[in-house]
Amino acid sequence: MIVKQIFTEIKSAPYDKKIGPDPSSIDSCMIGGIVSNNSSGMCCGVAQNTYNTIKDLRLIFADGTVLDTSDPESKRAFARSHGYLLEGLSKLAERVKSNPDLVAKIKRKYSIKNTMGYSINAFVDFEDPFEILKHIIVGSEGTLGFIGIALFFLFFSCYSLFSCLFSLSSFFSLFLLFRSVLLMIGIR
Ligand SMILES: Cc1cc2nc3c(=O)[nH]c(=O)nc-3n(C[C@H](O)[C@H](O)[C@H](O)COP(=O)(O)OP(=O)(O)OC[C@H]3O[C@@H](n4cnc5c(N)ncnc54)[C@H](O)[C@@H]3O)c2cc1C
């Protein structure tokens, strides 16, 4: 299903919500690509990019193992069969967090759009190895596993927003305009 259809379907549901990422490729891109590229867009910026709005993933790894991060039983089974992997992620996170300079650099680099390489900010942002794994998958370009299902947190859609262009003679006119708009929407 292309992402444009998802937008339309959520919009027509009674909730009037949308997913965070809004890339310009929305007419043709797929949800697996959105997650694997950590897509963002002109409206969502970093705050509502894929990394920050992903809720859960159903993943298929190269060895055929399936992990559904929304299912506690699936997580327990994965912890039994792939405990070494979760442990490795936790150790990596500990290593990163023990280096304050590296933590500061990662925070700085990911406070703006950054889709270079893996989402290593997951090592700074999370303690739970399942959360680290889920967020490392975001932006991993399919190199770590196949995404079968992606669940997103939803946001109120902005379809009723309008934009317009004003030509004003002075900065004071701009002030008057803002004041009028604020009064119109009930802010005094
Ligand atoms: C014209 C254009 C405009 C764009 N505008 C923006 C923008 O405004 N903002 C922005 O952030 N990005 C933008 N992008 C990049 C954007 O992130 C991608 O277009 C889109 O998210 C990728 O989706 P896709 O379905 O085309 O994926 P593809 O290009 O097909 O795949 C992308 C990667 O994901 C992997 N992949 C795909 N599906 C899966 C899956 N199910 N499981 C695992 N891996 C998978 C592929 O192997 C590939 O490495 C733009 C790109 C284009 C071409």
Image (cartoon, rainbow, N blue to C red):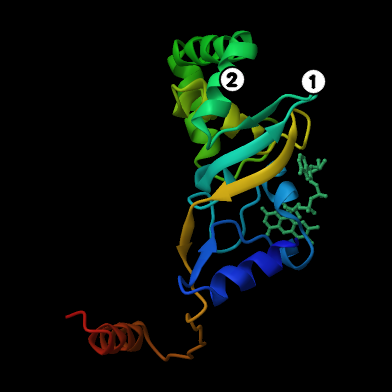
**Secondary structure at numbered mark 1:** loop
Q: Amino acid at mark 2?
A: Ala
| Residue at x 58%, y 27% (from the top left corner) | 74
**Viewer can see residue 119:** no
Q: Which mark is residue 52?
A: none
How many numbered discs sit on the rendered protein? 2
x and y percent of residue 27 in the render? 75, 68
**Secondary structure at numbered mark 2:** helix
The residue under label 2 is: 77
| Residue at x 57%, y 48% (from the top left corner) | 151
Closer to the camera in the image, 76 or 153:
76
Q: Amino acid at mark 1?
A: Asp
Closer to the camera in the image, 22 or 100:
22
x and y percent of residue 52 in the render? 51, 44
Q: Quadrant of the C terminus?
A: bottom left
x and y percent of residue 20 in the render? 54, 57
Q: Quadrant of the N terminus?
A: bottom right
Closer to the camera in the image, 88 or 121:
88
The residue under label 1 is: 63
